[in-house]
């Protein structure tokens, strides 16, 4: 033969189905003889593995180690439920409107808070508080009539709007 034997031919020789020419080439060619010996070794190893009892599975964890998982999930769900209830119990603008028993009353309160009172009778009361707010922001005393007359302040408008206590 001019060429070496194929893998299929080597397997046929192992199964005793090869031709006389293939058997002769196997005896003469060192490369084919070496490949044949390696094939025989591999097939013997495969046969031994298939005949051996199954190997115990590695890496499986017994379920007894995970008994705490359902308890942990239950605790997490309970904490989430408690936090959710606490969140829902907080007062929302809708609840404030329901307590006022009228959505229109809530809308009026909201409008007054955003755009100022629609009733002009409350403006002097807000203006009377302005000096105290300004003084609080400036960290000082509001300008009153007595302080204006003594020269401690110079804001005539706020001096006459504030009441002397």
Image (cartoon, grey):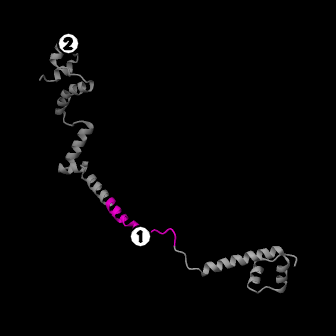
Which residue occupies the foreground of this view, 116 or 41?
Answer: 41
Q: Which residue is mark 1?
A: 63
Which region shows up in magenta?
57-76
The image shows residue 15 at horizontal and vertical percentages of 73, 85
Which residue is nearer to you in this view: 8 or 98? 8
Residue at 16% x, 23% y is: 162
Which one is nearer the viewer's eye here, 162 or 13?
13
Q: Main secondary structure of the magenta part?
A: helix
- Which image quadrant is residue 28 in? bottom right
Q: Is residue 60 magenta?
A: yes
Q: Earlier in the sequence, mark 2 or mark 1?
A: 1
Image coords of residue 149 (percent x, y) = 16, 13
Residue 21 in the image: x percent, y percent? 85, 84
Question: How many residues crowd mark 1 within 10 Å: few (<14), some (14–19), many (20+)?
Answer: few
Answer with left or right where residue 36 lies relative to residue 154.
Answer: right
Q: Which residue is mark 2?
A: 151
């Amino acid at each position: 033969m001019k060429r070496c034997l194929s893998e299929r031919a080597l397997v046929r020789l192992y199964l005793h189905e090869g031709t006389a020419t293939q058997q002769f080439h196997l005896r003469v060619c060192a490369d084919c003889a070496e490949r044949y010996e390696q094939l025989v070794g591999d097939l013997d190893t495969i046969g031994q593995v298939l005949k051996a009892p199954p190997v115990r599975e590695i890496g499986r964890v017994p379920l007894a180690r995970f008994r705490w998982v359902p308890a942990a999930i239950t605790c997490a769900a309970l904490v989430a439920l408690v936090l959710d209830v606490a969140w829902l119990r907080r007062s929302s603008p809708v609840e404030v409107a329901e307590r006022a028993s009228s959505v229109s009353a809530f809308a009026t309160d909201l409008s007054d808070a955003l755009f100022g009172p629609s009733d002009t009778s409350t403006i002097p009361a807000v203006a009377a508080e302005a000096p105290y707010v300004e003084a609080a922001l400036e960290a000082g005393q509001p300008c009153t009539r007595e302080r204006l007359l003594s020269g401690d302040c110079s804001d005539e408008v706020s001096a006459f709007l504030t009441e002397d206590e």
